[in-house]
Image (cartoon, helix red, strand yellow):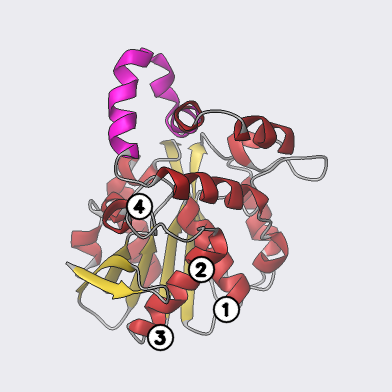
Amino acid sequence: MSCFELPNGEKLYYEDAGQGEQTVVMLHGWTSTHEVFAPCLPEIRKKARCIVYDHRGHGNSKDANHDKVTMDTLADDLDALIRHLDLHGITLLGWSMGAGVAMNYMANYGCGALSRVILCDMTPKQLNGADWDLGLYQGSYTKEDMERDAGKKFYPTYKAFAIGAIPKLAKVPGFLLRRPLKKTLEKCDEKTLRSLSVSMKEKDYRESVERITVPVSYFYAVPGSLYSPKLSDWYREHVHTPFEAVAFENCTHMMLTDRPEQFTKEVIKVLEKK
């Protein structure tokens, strides 16, 4: 078990394995852990050095939760890991909140340590409004919804998110769904999850996306669940470096588990590009 120490003395768990000249740093999503990448790691590690880690308040880093944790905090943690391991020419791969962390990192630190970025099924702005309908829940989630959710207990909010990500869960009786969802939440610190949920919704990375200076790949789900497939068109218009969009057909937000073989194949294709 490898850990690196944060400025406040807390430690984050990470794994560093694989071979090849390239390095991939993988960023997991909200309420997830590094284990979400497990299905694709064996093959990708044959092609590149792969670094996965658990964000603060998640998985094996669950106890790193004493400070208020925001998206800027997670971007700072990523920078600390990059410097700790002296990484250069990174392929930065973020799924869901992890893609938000990648965008936050590039906004705050630039792209000097990167060679390319892979953003997976994530919007640059979660809250929808008069000028934006490509945010959370297929364009339906607004500031008013966020304010309403702030007064709710945490489990119902998380349950709504889980059903949004995996719509078939809506057909599962509540008493059967509660146990697996609670088991997932047990791996995380609730205070951290609450803070990050708010922080994600307050962020707007649209302008910083236009300042990205490395090639961008966008992996997205069709028909999608949390986000609209039309986001791929927005990225294509606003990314000013070489760009590709990769569709995962008949897929929900959980592309890593819905289509693990395709996900692995597409990441390797990106690594093989010169």
Between the C-alphas of marks 1 and 3, the distance is 13 Å
Between the C-alphas of marks 2 and 3, the distance is 16 Å
Could you tell me the amino acid type at mark 3?
His
- The answer to whether residue 166 is above or below residue 48 is above
Between the C-alphas of marks 4 and 3, the distance is 26 Å
In contact (CB < 8 Å): disc 1 and disc 3: no
Q: Is residue 113 left or right of residue 139?
A: left
At x 44% / y 71%, what residue is drawn? 78
At x 36% / y 60%, what residue is drawn? 64
Looking at the image, tell me whether mark 2 or mark 3 is earlier in sequence order: 2
As drawn, the label of residue 109 is 1
Q: Magenta stretch containing residue 171, yes or no?
A: yes
Which region shows up in magenta? 160-185
At x 67% / y 71%, what residue is drawn? 240
As drawn, the label of residue 88 is 3
As drawn, the label of residue 75 is 2
Mark 4 lies on residue: 58
In contact (CB < 8 Å): disc 4 and disc 1: no
Looking at the image, tell me whether mark 1 or mark 3 is earlier in sequence order: 3
In contact (CB < 8 Å): disc 2 and disc 1: yes
